Amino acid sequence: MTSVKTVATARSAFLLWLRLIIAGLTNCLTLVNSIDGVHHSARNALLYIKRDEVAKMKWK
């Protein structure tokens, strides 16, 4: 029969493992959101430059 201490240790190890997995997934999602934000900003900058070039051509 397993002792209460062994069960408590196994439970603590499992909870620690679960927290590490959740923290890893959270960091991964944060990185993906950061990359998406940079992509969105770069795309907006390119669209702004393109609109500016079109506006300059209209005034010539």
Image (cartoon, rainbow, N blue to C red):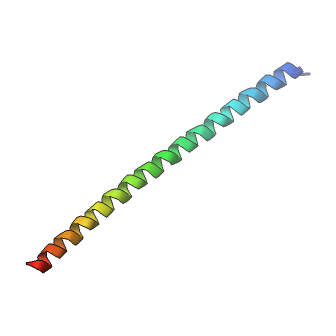
Q: At which x and y percent is residue 58?
A: 14, 80
| Residue at the limit of the structure toward the right, as seen here | 1
Give the camera-side residue of 35 and 50.
Answer: 50
Work out whether 43 lies above or below 57. above
User: Residue at point 72% right, 31% down?
Assistant: 14
Give the camera-side residue of 34 and 58.
Answer: 58
Work out whether 59 lies above or below 6. below
Relative side of 38 to 21, left or right:
left
Q: At which x and y percent is residue 33?
A: 47, 51
User: Residue at point 26% right, 63% down?
Assistant: 46
Give the camera-side residue of 30 and 16.
Answer: 30
Residue 21 occupies which quadrant of the picture? Answer: top right
| Residue at the limit of the structure toward the left, as seen here | 60
Relative side of 41 to 28, left or right:
left
Relative side of 51 to 34, left or right:
left
Q: Quadrant of the N terminus?
A: top right
Residue 18 occupies which quadrant of the picture? Answer: top right
User: Residue at point 28% right, 67% down?
Assistant: 47
Q: At which x and y percent is residue 53?
A: 17, 70
